[in-house]
Image (cartoon, rainbow, N blue to C red):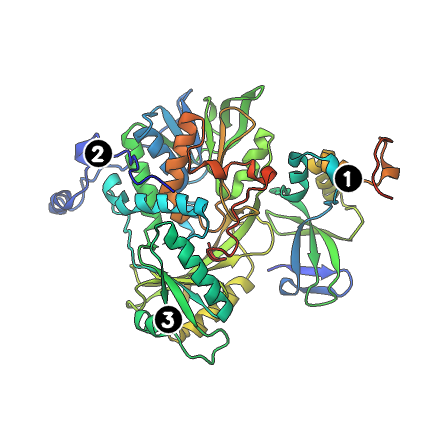
Amino acid sequence: MLEIKCPYCGPRDEEEFSCGGEAHIARPLSENSLSDKEFADYLFYRDNPRGVFLERWRHAAGCRRWFNVARDTLTHHILEIYPMGAKPVSKAGRAAYNANWRRDSQAEIAAQPASQKTNKTSSAKR
Amino acid sequence: MASTDIDRGVRGLRDRKKHYSIFSLARQAGDYHQGWQQAWRHAEPKPEYDAVIIGGGGHGLATAYYLASVHNMTNIAVIEKGWLGGGNTGRNTTIIRSNYLWDESAAIYEHAMKLWEGLAQDLNFNIMFSQRGVLTIAHSEHELKEMSRRVHAIRLNGIDSDILSPDEIKKFVPIMNMDPAIRYPVMGGFLQKRGGTARHDAVAWGYARAADDMGVDIIQNCEVVGLRRQGRKITGIETTKGLIKTRKVGCVVAGHSSVLADMAGIRLPIASRPLQALVSEPIKPILDTVIMSNAVHMYISQSDKGEMVLGAGVDKYNSYAQRGSFPVPEHMLAAAVELFPVLSRLRMLRHWGGIVDTCPDASPILSRTDIEGLYFNCGWGTGGFKATPGSGHVFADLIANDRPNEIAVPYALNRFETGLLIDEHGAAGVAH
């Protein structure tokens, strides 16, 4: 069984948490510009590594807040816990973040607000 | 629906001396069982094959068997990282049924059921197939209504399915606690009489022996470390026993499907999760059927050795560790003891986990890929064992002809792009 250190409540048993699957999946803002194949990357395709996995957990029976966890799926060892919206800081966590195919996917590019895009033709909201 | 006349690929063993029968048993008994032959060779890889199946579990061995027997492809090999049937084939709770809601599921699981019904004869191997019935119970008014809708859909597909009232359940399973005051009272259930169990190891061994007899090389302790390709075409696989050239590769590796897909540079919509099961000490026969409850996540049967075999739902996180967390079996045992108070002082002997390949729609993937000659059979999640013969039969057809047959068409990878999902979540039960 996992013992997860909730960043807000401290270490608790896995029983108190729910697992939200892969972290860092942003919803495309301009989904109409994506093909069905590209949208499927956002909707159905998930990273499933044998090794370091970045995932979301929620302290469901506690503070009910979400946070991110970098965990090794082979050993269940938790490498790092970091807040929503942040990126991993550990070396292994950063490597896992950068190695994920999603970083180059059209769905993720379409999830960036227009101001951050290098491509100025985009008409995404805000 | 599946056509009724399946090409079962029955050939009989080439080597008649290997034929198992009551007479061979008597003959061997007279010789103190010293003369039994090896059931399959310990093959070393040849430099090249017409096709290679990665994964020596039930599905992989069945695929190889049907490739050889139905499609006459005998220059093939099965590559297994560990020992034969040592993955999820040896870790499941051996339940067989075909009572699924959707037509696509009915087609493939009933196809498997028809093959199960003659498999021991086809393979000349006692797989201990026992159609003892599978009873799924309901614990609420809503579940009962949903169940009757499901039963009618299943019957429209020509699959046997009957609603049982609490009185009928009491007669059918006398040890079940029918007290209406328990937390999840039993309000009814539905029974597939043709469902049941089979000996999981024997299924792997039977397929291996019959495939080996036709010349299929079964290579154990051989891990695939890379896939060779030229452009978008498969040319071979790299293994711990060297390079093996082939133009067709069928991946049937369950929980490790994503790892192989990664080697090929493609992606699958799969999450690998632990699924746990446990068996008790052996006791005298008390349960002659299979009981499943989706609401309390528990399924139970009694093996021929007398052990109670119990399983639950998957753990909530991704894992490749072949173990899960304790709360899962704890909850399942609490449900089991409430439903069967007679089990309360039973000791559990063994407890284990397997890594299952779950799909977003809880249905499998039998598909070609963007790479020519690379095929995947995966995504069976928590319920692959029951489909073993059907999965192998359909997948062999896909590999041999490089096109999906009518059963396989809905299971292609592109359903996650078209949205034509086969949503079996809860439809035929959470515990697949």
Where residue B165 is drawn, which disc sits there?
Answer: 3
Disc 1 to disc 2, how far (Cα)?
60 Å
- Residue B221 pos. (x, y %): 43, 36
Q: Are marks 1 and 3 on the same chain?
A: no
- Residue at 41% x, 37% y is B60
Disc 1 to disc 3, how far (Cα)?
53 Å
Helix, strand or loop at disc 3?
Answer: loop
Closer to viewer: mark 3 or mark 2: 3
Residue B19 seen in the figure: yes
Amino acid type for the residue under numbered disc 3: Ser
Amino acid type for the residue under numbered disc 1: Ser
- Residue at 26% x, 39% y is B123
Disc 3 to disc 2, how far (Cα)?
45 Å
- Residue at 44% x, 79% y is B180
Residue B117 lies left or right of residue B275; in this view the side is left
| Quarter of the rendering occupied by the N terminus of chain B | top left
Disc 1: host chain: A
Where residue B73 is drawn, which disc sits there?
Answer: none
Return the residue found at the far top: B230
Q: Are marks 1 and 2 on the same chain?
A: no
Residue B389, located in which quarter of the rendered image? top left
- Residue B364 pos. (x, y %): 49, 43
- Residue B161 pos. (x, y %): 35, 58
Helix, strand or loop at disc 1?
Answer: loop
Earlier in the chain: of badge 3 and badge 2, it is 2
Q: Nearer the viewer, residue A40 or A94?
A: A40
Q: Nearer the viewer, residue B131 or B314?
A: B131
Where residue A30 is drawn, which disc sits there?
Answer: 1
Residue B97 seen in the figure: no
Residue B30 lies left or right of residue B266; in this view the side is left
The residue singled out by tag 2 in the image is B12
Residue B378 lies left or right of residue B125; in this view the side is right
